[in-house]
Image (tube, rainbow, N blue to C red):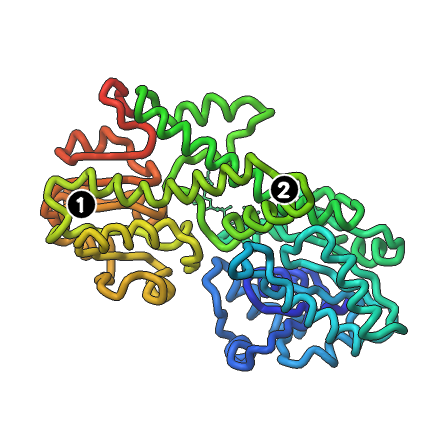
Amino acid sequence: MRVAMIGTGYVGLVSGTCFSDFGHHVTCIDKDVGKIERLNRGEIPIYEPGLDDLVRRNVEAGRLDFATDLTQAVKEAEVVFIAVGTPSRRGDGHADLSYVHAAAREIAQVAEGFTVVVTKSTVPVGTGTDLEHIIREAAPEADIAVVSNPEFLREGAAIEDFKRPDRVVIGTTDPRAREVMAALYRPLSLNAAPILFTERNTSELIKYASNAFLAMKITFINEMADLCEKVGGNVQEVARGIGLDGRIGSKFLHAGPGYGGSCFPKDTLALMRTAQEAGSPVRLIETVTTVNETRKAAMGRKVLEALDVPPRGATVAVLGLTFKPNTDDMRDSPAINIVQSLVDRGVTVRAYDPEGMHEARKVLPPSVIYTSGAYECAEGADCLVIVTEWDAFRALDLDRLKSVLKSPTVVDLRNIYPPVDLISRGFKYTGIGRGHPSSPGE
Ligand code: UDX
């Protein structure tokens, strides 16, 4: 099949590349000339494990190419994906759909023959219907079906998630579109991925409901962690204990500094706005977003409390800056709040992240000192804070760490170390939700 993918951001580039790996012919399109030139030279604009090899392999096989103009690719395509950004609109939190609308208009004007236009971008319920109107206005003769097909991939595990999804959701009631989409995803049926066909509005809602539910699950365990710290208890054991109940499930129950990233903060906000305007507010999610924001601010205070010296003049080493490991994405990362609150109190911040320092420089205060590795970062610091659980931080040489730190204080906001490992070496250790003195740790 011939596929056009409009937008080579995270979702567009990963999905386009994976579709080409299935054997379809895919053209990825972006208005950013520089980006397309870089992709044509084989340079991948984002960090995603395995993506560079996959792009190279499919380009060499002649199944994947890149273009700045959509005309040719859309003319030839049976399926055109819209995977452009839907950022939060300033002021009201609604998803900004201007790029999605513009893409639909352009597609309508050049499409030939029956064409399925698919929204891959996360779009609010009702967008598919709006796009149908836009397309009908722009090209009344065009034979186009608009389908919703939300993407659930996680950054850092995107290729695996695309190829072995828990489910594929396709929102359409058009029988021709359904047939085309079933053929497009046929290679996945070999991996036994269930394909759920629904009505379009429902499909659009599923995406927001999924992300909101996951954000809620994380926020729940984060509040349990706070409670554990107050009353004595180990949040990791609470998570395991509840997660073994199949109705709850064990995933997404890691307590931490609060969720971040390009999806949860933006999608929860957009769902809230949609629900408020529909007169059916999602109060749970409204609370979740408030609790998460408060939590990110509280993490800076947690670090300040762990310091044995006054903040002004103290040095804190921050390990991990991205919102999670295996990405260079800094969007809504808890590290932003933490570093800012430390700097505001006069702390000197040294920082290290395996992939995120380029992006971090754009959003962190200019006074942050970037270092070349974990031990360099810890050099002379009064406290070491682990903000993101990169594998590279999981097995640090603790004796070496102690010898380079000025004061052996560690705040582990991801609970990647058993407290006993550090405490037995003379560290002062603070984790998340397992700080009670009567708790033996593990
Ligand atoms: C998320 C959804 O998982 C994905 O389905 C959707 O398509 C896009 O949004 P992503 O933002 O890439 O994916 O990352 P994810 O792994 O879900 O983590 C999001 C945030 O939650 C991170 O800040 C992470 O650190 C945090 N998190 C996740 C926790 O604090 N605890 C957990 O147990 C899981």
Q: Residue 187: give its label.
A: none
Give the answer, above or below, for where 321 lies relative to 109.
Answer: above
Judged left or right of residue 127, residue 302 is left
**Residues packed near mark 2 inside 10 Å, few (<14), some (14 to 19) or many (20 plus):** some
- x and y, in percent, of residue 142 in the image: 86, 72
Name which residue lies at 55% across and 54% down.
93
Give the answer, above or below, for where 309 lies relative to 38.
Answer: above
How many labels, in total?
2
**Which residue in the structure is indicated by mark 1?**
383
- x and y, in percent, of residue 96 in the image: 60, 62
Which SS class for mark 1? strand
Judged left or right of residue 24, residue 344 is left
**Which residue in the structure is indicated by mark 2?**
209
- Toward the top, the furthest residue is 438
The picture quadrant where one finds residue 73 is bottom right
Q: Is 211 in front, or is 179?
A: 211
